[in-house]
Amino acid sequence: MPELSQESERGRSAAPFGVAEVTGPSMVPTLYHGDRLLVHYGARIKPGDVVVLRHPFQQDLLVVKRIAQRRENGWWVLGDNAYAGGDSTDYGVVPDDLVLGRVRFRYRPRRPGLRSPWALLGWALSAARPVFSGRSGRVASRRLRAR
């Protein structure tokens, strides 16, 4: 399950935006281990959005998941990697007050061994991207209906 660095919590009260780092594979292929995220705290969320939330059973742990649908008592969240687990299929509905913010932007740091000009160009063209609701959100919704 992607854990986020606690740096995002420290700057949260000062500004509506913060930075978090992804650890774990549950949001692959959208987010990878080591990706940095720009999080908009307190933003409006809707199904399909990638969000940062407190884990329902371990509230000092921050996780990143995709909102699948609204339920009566909160949000049903899923990881984009169906094989990684650690989402609402394990812990149920996430209450509104545990959803902290929406992920707006992803930055993928350069790997240390990346030296070839073509590899550097490929990294430069794909390193920074906005994180949209969309294609992966529909995949998560199909996975939810199939269960």
Image: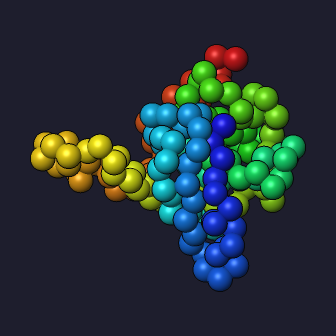
Residue at far top of view: 146
Residue at 68% over, 27% down: 85
Q: Count the marks: how many? A: 0
Q: Is residue 38 left or right of residue 87?
A: left
**Is residue 42 something that shows in the picture?**
no
Quick one: 28 or 146, which is closer to the camera?
28
Residue 22 in the image: x percent, y percent?
A: 56, 48
Residue at far bottom of view: 14
Residue 35 in the image: x percent, y percent?
A: 47, 50
The structure's colour scheme is rainbow
Residue at 59% over, 38% down: 24
Residue at far front of view: 113
Residue at 80% over, 40% down: 93
**Is residue 76 something that shows in the picture?**
yes
Residue at 82% over, 34% down: 91
Residue 32 in the image: x percent, y percent?
A: 48, 41
34 to 144, vertically: above or below:
below
Q: Quadrant of the C terminus?
A: top right
Q: Quadrant of the N terminus?
A: top right
Residue 94 in the image: x percent, y percent?
A: 79, 45
Q: Quadrant of residue 12?
A: bottom right
